[in-house]
Image (tube, grey):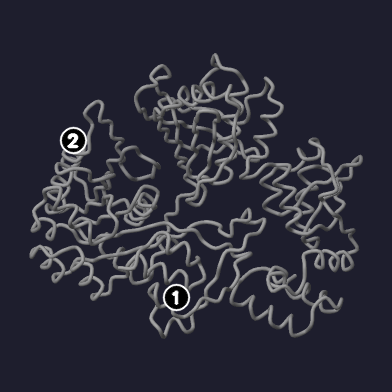
Amino acid sequence: MTMKIGEFLLNDGKISQDQLDTALELQKKQPGKLGSVLIRQGYITEEDIAQVLSKQFGYPSINLSKFDIGEKVLDLIKPDMARKHIIMPVHRIGSILTLAMSDPSNLFVQEEIRFSTNLRIQAVISPESSILESIDKYYGNATGIEAQRFLEEIELGDEGSIEMMEEEEEEEFLGDIDEDAPAIKLVNLTFKDAITQKVSDIHFEPYEKTFRVRFRSDGILHEYMTPPMNLKNKILSRLKLIAGIDIAEKRLPQDGRIKTKLDINGHKKTVDMRVSSLPTIYGEKIVIRILDKDNLMLDMTKLGFERSSLEKFERNIKEPWGIVLVTGPTGSGKTNTLYSAMSKLNSEDINIMTAENPVEFNLFGINQVNIKESIGLTFPASLRSFLRQDPDVILVGEIRDFETADIAIKASLTGHMVLSTLHTNDAPSTIARMINMGIEPFLVSSAVRLVVAQRLIRRLCKNCKAEIKIPMQTLIDIGYAPEVAKNVVIFEPKGCPKCHNSGYKGRVGLYEVMELDEELKEQIMLGVSTAELRQKAKEKGMLTLRMSGLEKIKAGMTSLEEVLRETTRA
């Protein structure tokens, strides 16, 4: 298809041979469809492609925006299927379904739809962006169109395709409750949209005159919908009920958990959610963290580590004893990194035990303990018990205080590998944080093998990113060496239907890996400042968060704005 479409456009006089050759060269550097490259270069429009394909295949070309598609037709094709293949059902006459496609040569898709609908397929051609806009319009997208349409015509009825499961008895479902169906259905619809769109957090926020729901997607919050105020209390009560927290208590923060089963294309998908409620002056704000195991990346080579940093990390987690710490703010991907490390170490001859608050993902072959401070099951209590369970590797969800740090260090010095997290800005400042907790410098230098600081930044959308010229001095100012600044190619976000016009799709990690060799341990014993420790680590090859970001920019993964937002030049 790649070469054919170029030949079609060339033969039709839409592009010149030079333009085709240029696009093919760019395609080698920026993998993707040739048509997308030609459009980004401004040589053609999507309409040009549609017209040429229409001539080539003999299918009519249509403007989807002029069609009003009925619900019965929409029900024939699931939203996930429509987005996956970029297709849109238009109308049905008898046993014939008119199907809009951006690539009519894909006969496999036509056969799949024919089989699933038991209808004959009449293909028509429409630009890709037009199809994606129609999918967003009719099936719903990040702007909450589907939810807003439901709000406009709220009625009692079906509670949706999400089932809430009790935590202790996963096969039993919560029965009917004394709540209005619209609130139940709206909560279920919100959960379904969030999970389908791979959202990480849902915020239910009450204000004086409005009630807002926001999604955090790729690290950025955006508004999803604004339910009517008369549903506020019912929605919040529904969330608290299924999370297993006290509905009557509205003065104190509370934590809970929701386990849901989501029906996607006839398949049941189980997703865990962490729930936090916080009293505000206009009511309780509830934030839900979605723990979708399908989004857990356990392959460390795909997290974003530079090669040298990954080699250091993998080498140290395989040592028989010591502490490896992962640091960063909430939402920086620390859990993913630690779970990836455990997955790497997990084998039948290794006893791995974890103390987490809470356990976010269940991993086979690993003994995981859910911390419950209300009954005395704390991190220190768990660690003391672990040492009587013959562990090889111990994961401590977070080192928060002297007692936890002290036990972790003693465990590491008596033949155990300990993995844990801290909240610090970068790798060198982690040492000062542990000393401030009350740990003696000689114990820190003896036990700690490696510290990883990390952040998550958004990836540029491969479909629409565009090259941008940046003054050489600006590149030098942010950290590039002059010889690198001369040749580096910088991309910026543009926005297209595939990325919902954000210019970004997905995220990648920035990693600062500080390995403590004998010289750095001696520096810690001497009590040097964090700045001096950082400088010495850089001299010994440590890539800072900024340097990791610059590598990602140079590789075309992200933009200058993303790296500058999350890092400082140190």
Judged by depth in the image, the label closer to the viewer, 2 or 1, is: 1
Residue 270 in the image, given as x and y percentages of width and height: 51, 37
Can residue 535 be seen? yes
Residue 91 in the image, given as x and y percentages of width and height: 86, 43
Front-most of 158 and 551?
A: 551
Which of the numbered marks, if any, corresponds to residue 183? none
Residue 30, quarter of picture:
bottom right
Q: Residue furthest top?
A: 178
* Amino acid type assigned to the residue bearing label 1 in the image: Thr
Residue 304, quarter of picture:
bottom left
Which of the numbered marks, if any, corresponds to residue 474? 1
Q: Which residue is mark 2?
A: 381
* Amino acid type assigned to the residue bearing label 2 in the image: Ala
Side (left or right) of 376 relative to 83: left
Residue 77 in the image, given as x and y percentages of width and height: 74, 43
Front-most of 170 and 176?
A: 176
Front-most of 432 and 251?
A: 251
**How far is the residue under mark 2 from the one under mark 1?**
52 Å
Looking at the rendered image, the quarter that the N terminus falls into is bottom right
Please rate how many residues cluster around mark 1, counting C-alpha atoms within 10 Å: few if below 14, some from 14 to 19, many from 20: few
